[in-house]
Image: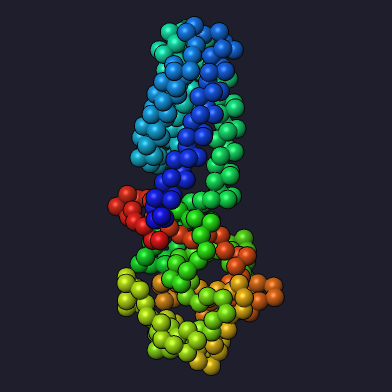
Amino acid sequence: MSTTLLTVVSLCTFFVLWFICCTLFLLWSTRKTRLLGTNLSRAILAMLAILVLQIITALGFALVRPQHMYQAVLLLLFETSLAVVLPSVVIMTVFRSRFIQSLMTWILTSIPSICATVLVISVIQALVFQIYRNPVRNMEPTLIPNDRIMVNKLMKPRRWDIVTFRYPGDPSEIYMMRVVGLPGETIVLKNGSVFINDRLTEFPGGLQGIRYETDLTKLFPGMSPITVWGDESSPAALGPNEYFVLGDNPTTNDSRMWNEGAPGHAPYALPESYLEGVVTHIYWPLNRLRTLR
């Protein structure tokens, strides 16, 4: 099964479960507020209409870019008001009730629905998927600043996959780079090419033209000499559960240049325990939409 199909199926499953919970909460609320004509089919219809309106308004607000703080505050207040008023109007229309009664119904529905939403999102982000905004140029031209990416936490990295990970020198920072060396391998970078266990490894399509230099004075004129991991004089020998990662941008601070590793590991090694997941998709902006694995 392709990663795109797997991602869609997983997200749809979580969405259906969330929708069922919210519909049941709405049905419970209509009975608590004693609306007339309460039944499951009307609750489903109302929740579908509310969901469509919320998606439309969210997309609309996403296109608005306030220039000043007061505009942002007014926009937030307006968005919050619509989030309360529009669902109440839908409930009033579907169940033919008074607005105040519909408002109370939506408030009762919102409390457990928000809890369910937080729970579902927390489970997804902790166990299955994570979304990030790429803030840097480490992976240009594959990833550019402000790309929104989706990360799968269940996949095991393969060579040339882009991964997100906690930087060994400061685990509070999240980095994105490409896996070049796998556990148990020895990596040497020679003339811009990658040698794995003394064998030249070809770049996959789309990466042709990338050169991984070990003579950093070519990239940073005037730079003082440092140990470059992966150089012929300093090969990167990986232990079990260790990876060697490089950025597509040749000036990236990657495994070649790290001077501090995770406890118990060489400076160039990325421990498997520091991995967050495999980058599978760029999902925003739409003109950048693509599958990476």
Residue at 47% from the left image edge and 69% from the top image edge: 158
* Residue at the extreme bottom of the image, as rendered: 233
Relative to 140, 115 lies left or right: right
Depth check, front residue: 221 or 28: 28
Q: Position of residue 51 (x, y in %)?
A: 42, 28
Q: Is residue 74 above or below residue 208?
A: above
Q: Is residue 69 above or below residue 107?
A: below
Camera sees residue 160:
yes
Q: Position of residue 227 (x, y in %)?
A: 56, 87
Q: Is residue 16 above or below residue 128?
A: above
Quarter of the figure with the C terminus: bottom left
Count of marks, rendered view = 0
Q: Position of residue 142 (x, y in %)?
A: 37, 65
Residue at 48% from the left image edge and 22% from the top image edge: 84
* Residue at the extreme left of the image, as rendered: 287
Depth check, front residue: 70 or 200: 200
Camera sees residue 132:
no
Relative to 284, 156 lies left or right: right
Residue at 51% from the left image edge and 51% from the top image edge: 129
Relative to 286, 92 lies left or right: right
Quarter of the figure with the N terminus: bottom left
Q: Quadrant of residue 21?
A: top right
Depth check, front residue: 226 or 44: 44
